[in-house]
Amino acid sequence: MKKLDFYLITDTHYFERSLGCSGEAYDNYMKGEQMCLAENQPADRAVFEAVGKDDSTDIVLLAGDLPKNGEYESHLALVEDLKKLQAKGKKIYLITAGHDFNDHPNAYAGKERIPVKGTTRDDLWELYYDFGLSDALAVDRKTHSYVVKLTDGFRLLALNVDSERETRGSVSDEMQEWILKQLDEAKAAGDTVIAMEHYPLIPQQPVFDLVGDAHLRDWRSKAAFLADNGVNLILTGHMHAQSIKRFTSEKGNSIVDIQTSAPVGYPSKYRKVSITDNKVSVKSFDTPDFVLEDGTKVDKPYFLRQFSQMIPNRMASMLKEGREDQTGIQKFLLKRVRSLTVGGVTRLAGFGAKPEIKNLKVTDFAVKLVLPMFEGDPQFGPGTPVYEDLSKFFSRISFILNKVNAKLSKDDRKVDIKELVLSSLYNDGDLSDNDCEFTI
């Protein structure tokens, strides 16, 4: 019997608080953020502390975007915390990603954003060499990808797809050849291979297939390549969402993508995965509650408030709220957007909204729609007021959608926005996005 247990954490976005995270500039920045920033360091430490207490599991995997925006001091502080976790007997294997280097690092004080020392990609090799690379069976020096033996019968294929900004989120032909070689060697040794990369392999919901940064480039062919060569499980992050999705290739081989949210932004989760032979069990945990120096309790509702204000605040920012160059028309539109209800929109489309949602403000309705796509397991399926009214609304504006669909469609794949959105409102797959068991 082959057995493997490990913790999975991704998108820690660790921020060294002493750099500065307060003041007017900070408050303005946080209005449009899903994640917290001043709370990142203690949130990550709370997760590390919880993981460190589990004596039954000694492997911890981190899937990239380690600091907030590549601040060198954040890297140094995170490394020290990871060493403390290692001292508790944990074996840590990680990959880096786009936010880890050359990403406009700054801090906040008063009315100013303050540039701080950043990190080069070469720095990452030295900083994190002892968290995977030092134990590697093979290394692709160009991409910083590596293979490591996790335990008897299991290898980790740690893939770094964030080496260059122009090709970020893609697997080159050269890298694919390297991967194939590693898979062949693992097969010869009789080892099961688990892959890990930062970008989701499979979009968290169908509509995210339209968002280029929400998944690996050319993800269908890469998923088929991995599945057809014996990789049935991959661990990802990047989108700060809970998602577990299965893809089956034309040859009938399947791969499951376990995408995990950031511990520092709602839904603020990390996971524990247990594998026995070909059976996989996934359990999700909330970031533990903690208290800041001023007595503020940071818990799940705290993270939820930060997430919920993001969408309306970004709408306001698009219409230049509070800026000197905001026009009278923009002020009028912003006022209308804030007062507009779902019922008001459906009346414009020529029908009445369901009583359950007609009085919801459009901004609140937007949060109601998006939130479950990040929490996982959305429940707005056929027969619900949300699904039925959105379906009717899309039908009423089909003359517009048809033109957009034509522009987005390609020769090998036709786009249907209505279908993509409606199928994203509920989880009709065989896997829960949070806790589930399945066979690979």
Image (cartoon, rainbow, N blue to C red):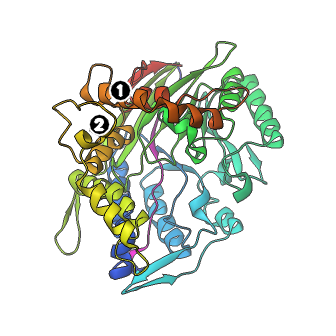
Residue 415 numbered tag:
none
Query: What is the CA distance from the residue labelled 1 to the residue labelled 2?
Result: 9 Å
Depth check, front residue: 55 or 348: 348
Q: Is residue 180 above or below residue 213?
A: above
In the rendered image, residue 16 lying in the magenta stretch gets the answer: yes
The magenta span reads: 4-17
Count residues near mark 2 (Cα–Cα under 10 Å), then give few for <14, some for 14-19, many for 20+: some
Q: Earlier in the sequence, mark 1 or mark 2?
A: 2
Residue 346 numbered tag:
2
Query: Is 394 on the left or on the right of 147, as rendered?
Result: left
Q: Amino acid at mark 2?
A: Thr
Q: Is residue 16 above or below residue 409?
A: below
Q: Quadrant of residue 402?
A: top right
User: At x 38% / y 59%, what residue is drawn?
Assistant: 315
Depth check, front residue: 54 or 431: 431
User: From this viewpoint, which residue is outermost toward the top?
Assistant: 252
The residue identified by callout 1 is 392
Q: How many marks?
A: 2
Q: Is residue 85 above or below residue 234?
A: below
Q: Is residue 172 above or below residue 112?
A: above
Please provide percent x and percent y for residue 283.
Answer: 36, 33
Please provide percent x and percent y for residue 68.
Answer: 48, 65
On the rendered image, what quadrant is the C terminus found in?
Answer: top right
In the rendered image, residue 109 lying in the magenta stretch gets the answer: no
Per the image, label 2 sits on a secondary structure element best described as: helix
Residue contact between numbered discs 1 and 2, judged by CB atoms under 8 Å: yes
